Structure formats: structure tokens, C-alpha cells
Amino acid sequence: MMHPGTCAIVPHILLTYVGISFSIQPVFSKSMSADFATLNPKKQVPVLIFDDNVLTENPAIVHAINHLAPDKQITGKDTLQFLRVCEWMNWLSGPLHAQVWGPFARPWRWTDDPAAEDGIRRKCRERVIERFDMIEEKLPESGWALGENFTAVDAYVFPFFRWGESRVKVDMKAKYPKWAGLVEKCWELDVVKSVVEKEEGMAKEVAEEGSDYSQIR
């Protein structure tokens, strides 16, 4: 289950990459059913359902996908890479996504005073850029985030780069050349192009539905 424009693109990319047969159920903010709330009381995406199991949160879903297709090594090719993927995924989903991206995108969840929202957004934009700087510093000069092989880390930093351009209004290519090089490598993967095209199609449904990504994590 996913909503375009959210971090649910990460498992979408990875499921497509590993070649597992799956179907996507779009979730629209204005038509969240009781069934969805029962599946995930957090009312957030992504949600992965497999073998009658319901799994939420990107780090956990990444490990589930790796379990279903271990030969693709999306959580690394050896123990050290596995630990680095865990390190990256926890940091991307926590200090970046939850702690600063969330209040930047949805400041009203952090205050009851509408007049305070601009200040929250402005301060969190500064923190988002600080964390973007850390990504650039941590990436290698070339190649994927962890070296020669594509992993879940690359799938997660890919959307943040695009959101940096479209939502944070940063010249990402100029400011973050190493990150830009990684994103170019992502675009060379047919699976990434396919996923983005599908998301763009779903975005049209979102517009017709009147759904708002800001209401969904």
C-alpha cells in the first residue's frame, strides 16, 4: 500500500528491483477506509502484506524484501555492508525523515498555533539541509552508497534528492555532486524509471481524488 510522493517509493523500487511479483494498492488521504486503519492503525504508508502478515516501517519492510529475495543482496553482500545498511536506514528513517522532514512538511502536527507553523517549517528546513549535507559527506566519490552494489540505501536517498529540488527548493545537483552522481546511476536502472512512471500515473489519481500527501507520512 502506498501513496505517491511519500517514502513508500522505497519498497516500490526494491520490490521491482528484486523481481518479486506484487500488486500496489494506492491509499488516498481523504478516503482512508476502516479496513486500512485496521491493517495499520498508524494510518501511514508503506504497508507490506505477505503470507497474511502485515508489516509497516521502511527499515522492517526492507529486511522483509531481502528475506524474500536474498540473492539480490539489497541489505548488503557481507556482514559489514549489512550493518552499514542498518545504520543508514535507521538514520534516514529517524533523524532525517521523522525528526526534521516530518515537521518541515507538516508543521501543524507540532503546534496548535497556526502562526507558529512558518517558524517550525523554516527551522526544520535548516535542519533538513544540515542532514542533506551529512549525506553528501558520507557518500563515496563515485558508485553506490556502499560501493559497487545497489542496496536499499540507494533506494532511500533517491527520493530525498528529488524532494530536495521540488520541496526544499535547493539546487541539489550543484550543492551535492556526489549525491547527484548516485541519483544518475539510479536513473540508469530501468526499474527506477518504471517505478517513477507508475508513481506519476498514481499522482494523477491523487489529483482527481483530492488526496494530499502531507496528510500521510
Image (cartoon, helix red, strand yellow):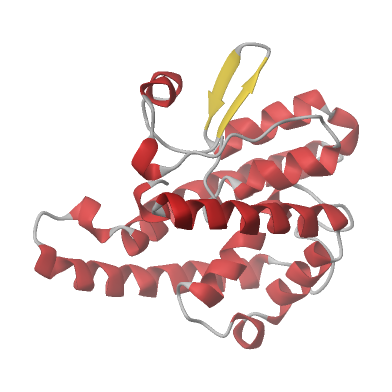
x%, y% of residue 146? 78, 55
Residue 133 higher or lower than 170, as above or below: above
Can see residue 140? no
Q: Where is residue 27 shown, x and y percent of the image?
A: 48, 38
The picture places residue 55, in percent across and down from the top left corner, at: 56, 24
Q: Residue at x 80, y 61 (%)?
A: 144
Instruction: Report the residue at 78% width, 48% height from top.
Output: 151
From the top left corner, tell me how far across and down residue 65 is, in percent: 73, 31
Where is 215 relative to 115, above or below? above
Residue that protrudes farthest toward the top in the picture: 52
Give the left or right position of residue 30, taking residue 48 as reference: left
Q: Is residue 162 above or below residue 192?
A: below
For residue 157, side relative to residue 72 (left or right): left
Considering depth in this image, is 194 or 163 the residue closer to the camera?
A: 194
Residue farthest to the bottom, as pictured: 174
Q: Residue at x 59, y 37 (%)?
A: 59
Q: Residue at x 43, y 25 (%)?
A: 36
Image quarter for residue 82? top right
- Of residues 30 and 208, the one drawn nearer to the viewer in this rendering: 208
